[in-house]
Amino acid sequence: MYEKIREISSTVRVLLASGHSLDGEAVKNLDHNHTGFIQKPFDVQALSKAVRELLGGR
């Protein structure tokens, strides 16, 4: 799915949520300038922080 989104727009920002670690196979080819990552399980505060960081609002 990530690859299809990137084909449509190379600058779209994507927040990947996964139960696997950031070091895993699923995230090795991500463009980390436009991609955030959040580890499952997460709470609303962690999700809010990840979205803010991805959008550049830390």
Image (spheres, rainbow, N blue to C red):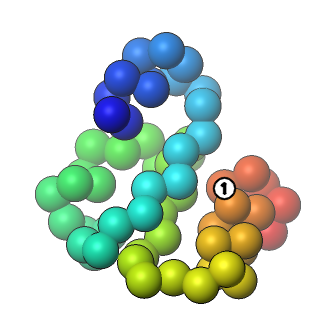
Q: Amino acid at mark 1?
A: Leu
Q: Residue furthest right?
A: 57
- Quadrant for the C terminus in the image: bottom right
Locate residue 20: give its quadrant.
bottom left
Residue drawn at (34%, 67%) of the image:
18
Apparent side of residue 9 relative to residue 50 in the rendered image (left or right):
left
Camera-side residue: 32 or 38? 38
What secondary structure is found at the residue carrying circle 1? helix
- Which percent across, then down, holds residue 24? 19, 66
| Above or below: residue 5 compared with residue 20 | above
Camera-side residue: 52 or 33? 52
Q: Residue furthest left?
A: 25
Q: Which residue is mark 1?
A: 54
Q: Residue furthest top?
A: 8
Apparent side of residue 36 relative to residue 27 in the rendered image (left or right):
right
- Which percent across, then down, holds residue 31? 43, 42
Apparent side of residue 34 relative to residue 38 in the rendered image (left or right):
right
| Above or below: residue 25 compared with residue 35 | below
Residue drawn at (29%, 74%) of the image:
19
Camera-side residue: 35 or 17? 17
Locate residue 30: give its quadrant.
top left
Residue drawn at (49%, 15%) of the image:
8
Locate residue 1: give its quadrant.
top left
| Above or below: residue 43 compared with residue 54 | below
